Amino acid sequence: MPESLITKSHRSPAGIREDEDIVQRRTLRDYYIMLRERVWIALPVALLISLSYGYWKSRETPMYMSAATMQFEKPETIVTAQGVVDPAIHSDIDINTYIQQLGSNKLRAKVIASFTPEEQRILLRPALKHLLPGQPPPPVSSMLGSVDPEPIPKSYLIRIGVSHQDPEAAALIANRYIKEFMQQLADDVSGANDFAVTFLSERVETLREESEAAQGKLNKYMTDHHLVSLDKTIDMISDGLRTVSGNLTTAKLDLLSLENVSQQIETFRHGDRDLMEISYIAGHGAVPHLRSELAALQQEQAALSGRYFERHPKMIELAQRIQISKSMLDKEIDGAIQDLHTAVTAKTQNVQSLEAEYESRQKQELDLKAMSVDYDSLKSQADAARSNYASTLERLNQTKTTKNLNLEKIPLHPLDAASPNYAPYKPNISGIVRTSVGLGILTFVGIAVGLSFIDDRIKSAWDIESFIGVNLLGIIPDLGHLKLEDRYTMLADGNSSSPGIEPILGIYSSIKIHSKLDFPKSLLVTSTIPGEGKTLVSANLAACFARHGKRTLLVDCDLRRPMLHRHFRQENTSGIIAWTESGASLEGDLMTNPHLGIVPVAENLSVLTSGGRSKSPTGILESPVFGQLIERLKGYYDLIIVDSPPMGAVTDALLIAQSVDEVIYVCRFNRAYRKHIRLFIRTLVDGKNTVLGIVLNGLSPRRIAYYSNYRYYRSYKKYYGSQT
């Protein structure tokens, strides 16, 4: 791997960088690793975001586009009198002027007024589908859609594009704009040319007929439907509908309450519970009085039972009265239940009656609303037709006064009429798909790379040697495929086929290279958090030294959660805690001390267990006698390997470190945070401990190839891939 960092620092004697400024240079391979390691986090999020965006955009209201074109000719014109508008095209300014006129409010108002009731219903079709009961229809002006007039470059053509929620409405509006714009040009031309007179005369006659027809339709509609004041009728129906809706809601709530009481009674009956616990039964009719009377009789019976026997006349009479009261109470309860069922039936019929009335009034309102649309449309059409007829007639009279003026005819005619386009241009499915895919890719890459930059967990040789600043002693592959009892005795049992043996031998070689002390010596193995494999490393490293002829003692100093005795199938009745409780005697032969209970488990390998559990072992570990015990044991062994608790959980490891010579730190891949490891190692170094380095544990062969910069470890997948 090429050099991947820039540093401005210096190393302390223990090998820890101080005041570092480290920047890691990342290659394309590093980013590929980021994406591959976080694919199952980033991919679902990216899919969720891209699919949600695509679904949201695809749910947009469909919009349809229709377009019509007009052509302006440029004839030779001779203007003979002032006061006459020359509509011919002389420059781009003229075309731009027409564009502004097409977008003016004046023309918009004329277009709106020109629609017949049938055409208005076409425009309002999308809105009427979503109207709520009692809600009036929107005005036609709000449903005109989007009108976009634009000149076609390098031509005398103008295109009028209209987008609308209804394809037929879009085409209708585009064609109507052209028609009304031509009419507006004709109205704006003040002159008396033959074309204008003929056009206006025909227009006046047409408008007169349209005005009379519109007024006749309006009068007939009002006569057929007996309409005098439509607004007041609609208001009365709406008020009645709201009243019936309120009554229906109240009736449903009352029915629900009665049904809940009925259900509660059935539940109490099936559970043999006292129905008097139900407030409806307890308070119904004569039930409270009968309960009080029965309670008084029972109280009297209890008082007389101390004086008379059961066969005494008074006791017999009192028992009969109690029996009668109970019978009456039971009948009253049955009557209450019957009344409840009757009330439920009556309330159900009431709800059904109100629902039928609500549907009837709702239908009346819808009918009136439909009539309102027709009435308003007819009235608006009649008013517009009458107004257009009057204005056009006046214009014709003005034009006739100047008919001797020689004016050019309006050089304007429609080129292509708009036709309905039933394929919506919005939502654009292909564009949505492209955007969704792009958004998904960006999200996937952003999340994967972003998580990598904010993830501070230990992963690579760079993290150990460059960021933390200590030696990487070796990498142990993931041994999850091995049985639990076989992982801790791989070298002790001589299982040469295990893929974990070669890494342990490599760690053994690294320790010999980096250690500056001669034998005998003591070695502490610790980690940051539980579950990182420090016990695995301790047990197999001790067996490795033993196989190389070193008398080795493996000590279990995890006095809170000892585990070594289980892995080596030993009892935990003797050990450090038992020895301390027996007086911590250093006299005599420690190898035969029954309280220590040092047990040989293999050639040159012995185990010293914890001797029990302790919730507060700090008193044992910080006592001088513990350090003296370690020193005495050096007289029997070449190497003492101490398995300690994790430093991030308790302070035991720091106390043990005061009594040992060297420290090995175990880190599990993608588990502990770099800043925590760096802090604990700095604490060990500040305590004058020699940290030989870090063992990186739990990497799969694939990850070893990705995260390690040692060619040796990259060959694991080749040699052990079939087994792992």
Image: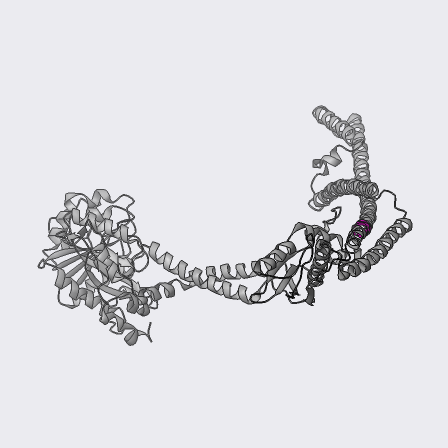
**Residue 276 versus residue 213 in the image, above or below:** above
Q: Quadrant of the N terminus?
A: bottom left
The residue nearer to you, when weighing 79 against 245, is 79
- Would residue 578 be seen by someone viewing this image from the given angle? no
Q: Toward the viewer: 374 or 17?
A: 374
Q: What count of labels does the image hold?
A: 0
Is residue 385 on the magenta stretch? Answer: yes
Residue 514 vertical position relative to residue 264 in the rendered view, above or below: below
Quadrant of the rendering where the C terminus is positioned:
bottom left
Does the image show residue 661? yes
Where residue 391 appears, as percent x and y from the top left, is: 78, 50
Near-viewer residue (164 or 609): 164
Q: Which residues are magenta?
A: 381-390
Image position of 441 (left or right of 609): right
On the rendered structure, is 533 left or right of 145?
left
- What residue lies at 91% left-to-right and 51% top-to-bottom? 224
The reply, left or right, for residue 672 in relation to residue 196 is: left
Residue 296 occupies which quadrant of the picture? top right
Q: Give x and y (percent) for residue 139.
A: 72, 49
| Residue 251 position by quadrant | top right
Colour mapping: one colour
Q: Magenta segment: does it hold 380?
A: no
Nearer-the-camera pick, 608 or 482: 482
Magenta portion: prevailing SS class = helix
Residue 146 percent location from the top left of the image:
64, 56
Residue 498 relative to residue 216: left or right: left
Looking at the image, is 483 positioned above or below residue 300? below
